Amino acid sequence: MTNWIAPPVDRQSEPMTGDERAMLEGWLDWHRQTLLGKCAGLTADQLKQAAVEPSNLTLLGLVRHMAEVERSWFRTRAAGQDVSRLFGTETNPDGEFDDVGDADAESDFATFQAEVDLARQAAAGLPLEHEFATSRAPAISLRWVYLHMIEEYARHNGHADLLRERIDGVTGD
Amino acid sequence: MTTWTAPVVDRQHKAKAGDERTMLESLLDYHRATLLTKCAGLTAGQLKQHATDPSSMSLLGLIRHLTEVERGWFRRGAAHEDLDMFYCSEANPDGDFDDVGDADAEADYANHLAELDKVRAVAAGLSLNQTFTRNDTTFNVRWVYLHLIEEYARHNGHADLLRERIDGVTGE
């Protein structure tokens, strides 16, 4: 065990006016930072606490899940990069949530940060109209990926709100 | 007490590609329907339950809150309609969440649907780049759509955990 605690974040307000791309990126960054803000100041053990039983969700599980989701949508699918999953496998599809007990929280936070940087780089060269196919949909646009990432983070940040409140009573946007 | 329960709703898939406006409206409608889906089949008593204590949230509180949010941003904000709030006031800013105990769930649910109809009618006449000022800050209508999507999505995250603790039901 280390004395590591999740660091504070510098969250920037999203733009209230602007063009589509700037506002999609601004909202997505705001929610990325919100998830980290919900973790800030907590120990690894607190981040691993399934605090809203019977749900097995944990704050560390959410951070690991979003690292996986960033990689999957921006790098693997939209940009066509040949990268494997970070925490899950075919035989352990929910490893990011299920395997937090043995996880190294500090290392997983570093992985998340690195993955966000790589996702930004992967998206930077692509227009919102860029389309790709998956096994379940013949045509998905990068515009959809941004919108999906915003709603995916936002929904999980709702989970994070209630987890954090039950861990130490802290609330807030 | 009546035997009313929140009805089952028909939720449409999200558009996977298309122009900006089409996709914003599709995703917002998906989250509007998701909140109602999280309530479907529950009684008024269950909808009022503060199931994730110490949070004061309840599913009925979320419906009432999103009714205020829709009216506040689309009608009072972007469309400049001179309207009062339904449940909140300056003296009681969290009345949407705090006053669910005495609320009529069936009436609040109907009010939510009626407000959505009015919001859709107003929003159809607004362009995404149109701006308005509220509390000394200028917003565009694009921001309103994005905010409503992330607002619903975040509250639907709350609804996920409330519902799971009320009767064990989970799912997107």
Image (tube, rainbow, N blue to C red):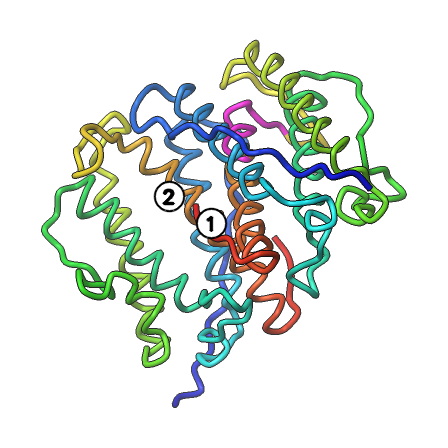
The answer to whether residue B15 is magenta is: no
Residue shown at 47% from the left, 49% from the top: A31
The answer to whether residue B146 is magenta is: yes
- B170 or B30, nearer to the observer: B170
Q: Secondary structure at mark 2?
A: helix
Residue shown at 42% from the left, 27% from the top: B12
Q: Most extreme residue toward the left, as rendered?
A: A82
Q: Which residues are magenta?
A: B138-147
> Which residue type does callout 2 highlight?
Met
Label pair 2/1, CB-CB below 8 angstroms: yes
* Co-location on one chain, circles 2 and 1: yes
Return the residue at label 1.
A31
Q: Most extreme residue toward the right, as rendered?
A: B91
Residue A67 position in % (x across, y down): 31, 58
Chain letter of disc 2?
A
Residue shown at 65% from the left, 46% from the top: B59
Question: In which quadrant is the N terminus of chain A drawn?
Answer: bottom left
> Which residue type does callout 1 highlight?
His
Principal SS element in the magenta part? helix
Left or right: residue A113 compared with residue A88? right
Left or right: residue B28 compared with residue A170? left
Q: Quadrant of residue A64?
A: bottom left
- A110 or B86, nearer to the observer: B86
Mark 2 or 1, closer to the camera? 2
Residue A168 position in % (x across, y down): 62, 73
State the mark number for residue A149.
Answer: 2
Decide: is A172 above or below A51: above
Upstream in the sequence, badge 2 or badge 1?
1
Q: Estimate the spatial distance between the alpha carbons at disc 2 and disc 1, rounded to whole Å.
A: 9 Å
